[in-house]
Amino acid sequence: MKISAFWVCVVLIFLAGLGLTHAAVNPYYFNALYVILQATIMAVAWNILGGFTGYVNFGSAAFFAVGAYTAIALDKALGLPLPFLIMAAALVCGLIGLGVGYLTLRLKGVYFAIATLAMAIVIETFVNNWSYVGGARGVYILTPEKHLWFDHYIEMLFVVMLGLALAAVAISRKLNSSRLGRGLAAIRDDELAAECAGVPTLRLKLVSTTVMGAMMGVAGAPYPFFVTFVDPISAFNLFVAVNAIAMPMIGGTAHWIGPVIGALLVGSLQEIITVTISSELNVLLVGIMLVLFITLAPQGIVGLAQKLRRRFFR
Amino acid sequence: MSQMVLRVEGITKRFGGFVALDSVALTLAAGERLGLIGPNGSGKTTLINCISGALVNDEGTIEFEGRDVTRMPPHRRARLGVARTFQIPKPFRSMSVLENLRVPLEYAAWSRAEHRRITDEAMEMLELMGLKHCAGASSGSLTQVDMRKLELARALAAKPRLLVSDEAMAGLSSSEVDEILETLFALNRRGVAVIMIEHVMRAVMKFSERVAVLVAGRKIADGNPQAIVADPNVIKAYLGE
């Protein structure tokens, strides 16, 4: 029965989101929710490689940006509708994930992390010099005021993002409890022991990087239509990568719900602080929260909750 | 000649200029119990790393049940039926004891497992190993002896035909050594050939049908346990002149 409870929640959340677009609310809220949902997808995606498999990726922003630029290039060249752009971004970023995984997964720990950071810089340099998508100057995307049955374009983007985020969470949850997920956890715990228990570690790590890359590409594809101006500095922003790491760490990396909790909590706080105090302070907030959680609750909120439950209910 | 489970021929492994194994040959019949002994640094663990695929030997061939596995990655050897334990236990720490056994059942033994009964099969193996009481416990919280048993249980869950046990008894008390010995015998009775690397001579003598001795990367003796311990070369290697 637990499975259906999850799916009932997914459907209810999606319907609630749809309902929200028909209630006359300030469009700003859709902007804010879009940012939070984008962060959720990024966090869930990062966690598949970083949390489930144990490989820390500092290059998240590159996958995100490639997703965004794939959408820009295909929009400009073929004028494809958004769903196709999203699928194309998933494909391109999945392939980059596979390629990067193949080149770097023989590296471990900090060496892998640095390799992903280097990869992000290489791709950024490439985009900086690709004038078709604006190069270093950036590119403007024009979006219509209204879209089909939505009053504002942002409402449509919000619903798309909500659907994508729910799909990402469902995939991550499925992975977490499956045979594949157990293989990934075995790799994280001890790669040699996993290999000797019959786990094809290289293949599973490639699956992990591919899924991670594709998900991040999906998170990036609608981004140009959201901000309407994209340049490499904003798309390859280190803050995107830092958020993608911080949110799962704060929520808890071992369980699928961890990055969701982390993204909703930190993302909401960031929005609130941006609006009420300053947009600079939210960067500081992430830093402070990350330090606090790593020192005081290294298993994140999920780990903390499990610990408390064990203490009080046994 | 009975069917050979393992045939190692002339394997050499170098680390830079250091020769860890120097054309070692070793065979093992189906269901046989072999003790592998030798002073520290003699290449025992390197040999089993080569057999399990964790290291690739520079020269020589390794055949498992008539199939050349010399260049095969460890997970494929595990699928064929080669299992090993680690000298320093390597449990999957984020998982419970039961889940630790699910990994080999779902990977190494996937083609031989009863797919609808993975949990039951894992429980049966825990029972055989005397670990049933801690099935739900976190594997990182086990005592040393239970952790060694978990290593063996996880190897067993791969449903191997060859088990290499790397110092499963080091640092254990006398009664704990007997417990581990009993589980190794139980495994062997199921038709699993066992290579036991051990320094506890009482266990080696009790368990082994045959003993091989490695010294400085060379096999200096191989045969009947009683004859081996009386062999002047072996005594010299252990005690000096």
Image: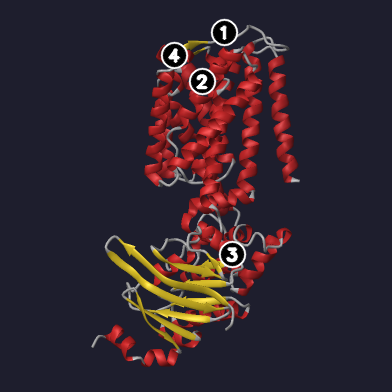
The residue singled out by tag 4 in the image is A131
Distance (Cα) linking label 1 and label 4: 18 Å
Marks 3/4: CA–CA distance: 54 Å
Residue marked by disc 2: A69
Secondary element at tag 1: loop
Marks 1/2 in contact by CB < 8 Å: the verdict is: no
Task: Residue A142: give its label.
Answer: 1
Q: Position of residue A167 (x, y in %)?
A: 65, 33
> Mark 2 belongs to which subunit?
A
Looking at the picture, which amino acid does disc 4 mark? Answer: Ser
State yes or no: discs 1 and 4 in contact (Cβ < 8 Å): no
Whether B103 is drawn above or below B171: the answer is above
Quadrant position of the C terminus of chain B in the picture: bottom left
Q: Residues within 10 Å of mark 2 (few under 14, many from 20)?
A: many
Nearer the camera: disc 2 or disc 3: 3
Tag 4, which chain? A
Q: Real-space Cα distance between discs 2 and 4?
A: 12 Å
- How would you rate the neighbour count of disc 3 (Cα within 10 Å): few for under 14, some for 14-19, many for 20 or more? many
Q: Nearer the viewer, residue A246 or A71?
A: A71
Same chain for mark 1 and mark 3? The answer is: no
Q: Position of residue B185 (x, y in %)?
A: 56, 81
- Dot 3 amino acid type: Leu
| Disc marking residue B80 | 3
In percent of width and height, residue B135 lies at 60, 64
